[in-house]
Amino acid sequence: MPEALLEAVALSRRFGGLVAVDAVDFSVRAGAIHGLIGPNGAGKTTLLNLIAAALPASGGTLRFHGEDITRWGPARRARAGIRRTFQNLKLFAEMTALQNASLGLHAGTRAGIFAALVGTPGQRREEREIAHGARRALEFVGLAAQADVVAAKLPYGHRRLLEIARAIVAQPALLLLDEPAAGLNATEAVNLAGLIRRIQGLGTTVVLVEHQMDVVMTVCDTITVLNYGRKLAQGAPLEIQRSPEVIEAYLGGGDEPPAAHAVA
Amino acid sequence: MTRIVTAAILAALFALPLFGPHPFILHMLSLVAISATVALGLQLLLGFSGQLSIGQAAFYGIGAYASGLLSTRLGLPFPAAFAAAGLAAALASLLMVPITRLTGAYLAVATLGFSILVYLLLKNEEWLTGGSFGLMGIPRPSLFGHVLTQPGHAYLLCVSVAALVYFSLLRLERSRFGRAINAIRQNEDAARACGVQVTLLKSQCFVIAAFVAGLAGSLYAHQVRYLAPTDFTFWKSVEILIMVVIGGMGSLFGAVLGAAVVVLLPEVLREVGDYRMLVFGAILMAVMLFGETGIAGFLGQCLKPFSKR
C-alpha cells in the first residue's frame, strides 16, 4: 500500500477484562476516504478514540506521517492535524456557530494574553483572519446564514454540520468522523455524502465510522470491517459487500450483503 | 448602546468626588471597587474558564500582606509594593497548577484547603505578619511622591484600578484566549479536540485571577491601613464567590454589581440590627430565584425592550 498517512500496528485497548480493540493493524492511505464498519460493539468508535487520543492505547503503536504518536495527547494530535467529530455532538453550546468554527483555528494561531491586552496589530490581523476562515468553513458546509446563531439553538442536522465545519476549518491532514449521519434524514444523508467527498477534494484524508451503509458504500474508497475488536476484512466497497465473512458477521450466517441496495 | 452606558457610568464614577460626598461614602465605594477587582478575577476563573475556586481570599490576603509588609518594613513606595503584591499572589498561585486537573467539587475543596493554609500562616507566623495582633501603621497610598490623604483621591485610585482590570479582562474575553477558556468551560473534550492546551490555559486563568486579587489586596491594605488575619478567612473567599454568582456568572459587569451588593447591603441593613445577616441571606436566596444569570442577567432582561438591536 503506497504512502500510509496513518498506520496502526497491533493497536489494542482493554477495558478491564474486555478487549475492545484487539491488536488491530490498520493503515490509512493519504487522500482516501476510509470507512470503518462493523456490528454494534465491534470497537469502531474505540478505534477512532485511540486515533484521536481521547483514550490511551493499552498496547501497540500509532504512526502519523511516519512519526510515532502513540504517546501524544489529544490536543497535540489535533495540533498536528488530526481532527474529529463526536458521535454525541460536543459543541460549545453557548457560542455562536461562527465562534464554534473559530475554535477550530485555535491551534494554528498564536496571539496570547499579552497580545490581546495590548491589542497589537498582529493580534488584530489574526482575529480578522480567524473570523474570515471560520466564515469560509461555515459556507463550505452550508451554514453561512447561521453564523450568528447560538449552537444550542441550531436544529440537529445543522449542529452535525457545525461540528464538521469546526473540524475542517484548519484544513487538517486527517479528519475522523464518528457516525456523522446518525439522526439525519435521507436528504441530509445524501448531502453529507457529497460534503465528505468535497472534504476529500480539499486534500483531507477521512476516516469514517458509520452505520448508514448507503453513505459508507457511496463515499468510501476503502473499508475496514471490525468484529469483536478484531479486523475482519479490508477492501474496496464491492469486495466488502461480497465478503462471506462480513456477511456472516452482520447477519449471522445469512446470505445477504450488508446493504444490497447500496450504490457503489 | 452598551458603549454609551459604560461611558456614562464611568464618567459618573470619576466625577463623584467633585460633588463632595461624605468621606464614609467614598470609603465604602473604595471598598466596593477593591472587592469588584477581586471578583473580576474570579469571574475570569469561574465564569469564563469554569473553575470553581473558594480560595480567592488567600491570594487577596497574600497581596495585602505583601504590600503592607514591603511598605512598613522595607519602606517600599506604594507603586512598587502594589506591583509586588500582584506578583506575590501570582507566584503563590503557581502552587495551584497541579490541582487544575481537578474539577467541580474536588477543585473547590482543594482551593478551600489552600485558603485555610494561608490564613493559618498569616495568623501563626507572628515574626512576619504580627499574628493575631495584625499589621499596623500601613502608610496611605502615594503616587509620584504625592500622598493620597484625601478620601476622594484614594477612591479615584481604587476606581482606576478596578476600571483598568475591567477593561483588560473585557479585552481578554473577546480574544482568542477568551474564546479558548470559554470553550474549556463548555466542553473540555471538544476544546482538546480543537488543539486547546487545557491544563496550560486553566493554570493561566488561576495566575491571572490571583494576580488581580493580589493587586486588590494591596489597595485594601493601604485603604484600611491595618490588616488582621481574620480579614482573609474562608468567609472572605465565600463572599467573593457570592459576588460573582449573584452578579451573574460570565458577566464582568455582573461581578462589579455583585461586589457592590455584597459590600453595601450589610451597611444599608444596619437599621435592622442583629437581623441584618439574616435579611442578607434571604436577599441572596431571592436574587438566585431570578435565575442563573444573576443581577446582570435580570437587568439585561429589563433593559431589552429599550435597546435597539
Image (cartoon, rainbow, N blue to C red):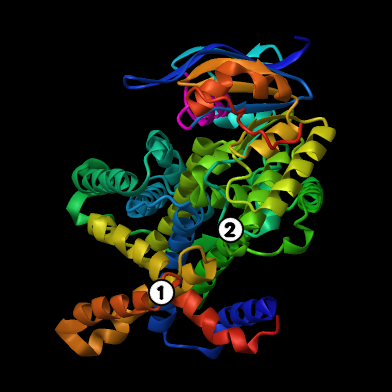
Q: Which residue is mark 1?
A: B291
The mark that comes first in sequence, 1 or 2, is 2
Helix, strand, or loop for circle 2? helix
Q: Mark yes or no: residue B179 visible.
A: yes
Chain on which label 1 sits: B
Residue A153 image offset from top left, x and y in percent? 59, 65
- Which residue is pictured at 78% across the width and 10% down the height? A2
**How dense is the environment of label 2, judged by Cα within 10 Å: few (below 14), some, or many (20 and up)?**
many
Q: Is residue B208 above or below residue B309?
A: above
Chain on which label 2 sits: B
Is residue A257 covered in magenta? no
Is residue A44 covered in magenta? yes
Q: Is residue A174 above or below residue B190?
A: above
Residue B292 image offset from top left, x and y in percent? 42, 69
Amino acid residing under circle 2: Leu
Relative to the observer, which residue lies in front, A234 or A93? A234
Relative to the observer, which residue lies in front, A248 or B293? A248
Q: What span is in magenta? A: A40-57
Amino acid residing under circle 1: Gly
Q: Which residue is mark 2?
A: B169
Q: Mark yes or no: residue B175 visible.
A: no
Question: Along the horizontal axis of the image, is B117 left or right of A240?
Answer: left
Helix, strand, or loop for circle 1? loop
